Amino acid sequence: MSQRNDTAIWSGLFRISPESGQTLQAQIRQAIVAAILDRQIAASMPLPSCRILAEKLGVARGTVVLAFQQLVDQGFLIARERRGHFVNPEVLTTPAKPRAPADGADGIDWTARRRIAASDMPPPNKTENWIKSAYPFVYGQFDPALFPTAEWRECNRMALAVLEIRNWAADVVDRDDPLLIEQIQARLLPRHGIFANPDEIIVTLGAQNALYMLATLLMGKGSTVAMEDPGYPDARSIFRLAGAEIAPVPVDEEGLVAARVPGDAGFVFVTPSHHCPTMVTLSEPRRRALLASAVENDQIIIEDGYDSQLLDEAPQQSLKSIDRSGRVLYVGSLSKTLAPGLRLGYIVGPSALIAELRALRRFMLRHPPANNQRAVALFLSLGHHDALVRRLSAAFDERRRRLTEAVGDHLPDWSAGGVAGGTSIWLKGPPGVEARSVAAAAARRSVLVEPGDRFFDRLERPTRFLRLGISSIGLQQIEPGIRELAAVASPRSAAA
């Protein structure tokens, strides 16, 4: 039955009473206007036909026709030939009218009843409509021009074949697609020097879901997590939500200062391949020192393979690959290569831990969607991901060089770390600059950059840093975008 003929959809929207002081036509108009302003009718959904609505309300068809016509004249509805009446999309651009709370709902203090303070954590850096910006130096987004549309469609079509559907449509409870596990094991992990058995891998809904599962399973009140400062803000919030305390550890040009990791911390979170957000690589001596300290102090290391999926000029093996104690847990994802919206990641760890994570995941979400797992498995098995990594690596290398040159030419007072990989650069401004003001002024010029203060755990957060991403901006937009940024990036121009 079509939406137009499904009267159940409209039963709660039209309440017509012959005892009302308003005419039937006015009551119909009022009901439709109220539903539109309350966002109860989607712009894509046709209203019931005049005949069907008249029958439902028990009124003359002409009454409904006149009501619809007046709403068209007032701009609330538009009539589309042979399709019916729809909400005018321009009406939906205005803010929605506040909704009256349900009976008794306004008397409940949900903040007081919560058990974890998720909304108190620092908000994400969320840029709406970034794709419409002229110069989107945003991190973690994708470039539609580089997305492997044809290859991804091919794999999804293959996953929808009858025999494939039989493989993924059933409830597999706590298991993952065996082909995907095989491909992670054979194609993704060896790139980082990791060789694991199938029972040492679990699929997650991205890296953040992996961190949340690890924190839920392993951490609680009394736990302490040593992590980089500056560092990954969402990881810091996830650990705090689990009840853990954070021990900030400084970072320099060699990465995390391993000697400053507290011995009484039960966990160490680190992004050694490309540090979040500076992109520096953890040096070999620091890696050895960190592993030795973890063994000595009985610490668990959570290694996030942050921004490590691409081919670097000087690639480093993961911490997991040189760990002989079994205390490094590796978290990876396909966000920086295939697509951030796909939300597909994985954890590599000892089989006993992975078994516990599977038991936990079953109560959270059972397993990530099996059809997506199969499509990604096919994408990997056909070599599409390897080809994509090569293409992205070449494109991002060129963009990184162009960006570094443009910063040197147009922002001589700003310093950029010389990093040979990753999808962003970390800029430090001159004394007196306020990065948030710079970012706001740049946004007015259609230049999107990210203030860096959110990455610090200190009460007095440095305000001179910006992060500029290269994954979503075209090569030709980089230099003019930096020129626009330079116009507002000095302390004097930012203040103005």
Image (cartoon, rainbow, N blue to C red):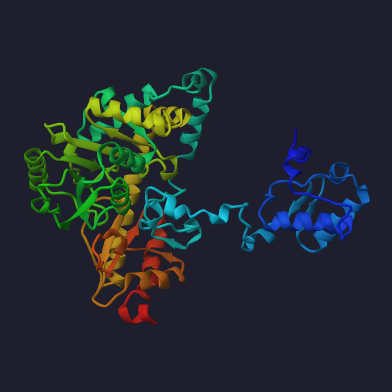
In this image, 482 relative to 167: left or right?
left
In depth, the one of 50 and 56 nearer the eye is 56
Q: Position of residue 81 (x, y in %)?
A: 82, 49
Q: Quadrant of the C terminus?
A: bottom left
Q: Give the image quarter of residue 413.
A: bottom left
Residue drawn at (25%, 48%) of the image: 244
* In this view, 120 is above or below 318: below
Q: Is residue 48 left or right of residue 389?
A: right
Where residue 28 sits: x, y (%)?
A: 82, 54
Q: Quadrant of residue 193?
A: top left
Residue 382, percent from left and from top = 39, 27
Q: Position of residue 217 (x, y in %)?
A: 29, 36
Residue 90 in view, yes or no: no
Res. 346 visible in picture: yes
Is residue 292 depicted above or below 196 in this figure? below
In the picture shown, does residue 278 fall above or below 293? below
The structure residue drawn at horizontal position 36% and vertical position 54%, both measured from the top left corner, is 139
Q: Residue at x 38, y 62 (%)?
A: 478
Viewer-proximal residue among 203 and 309: 203
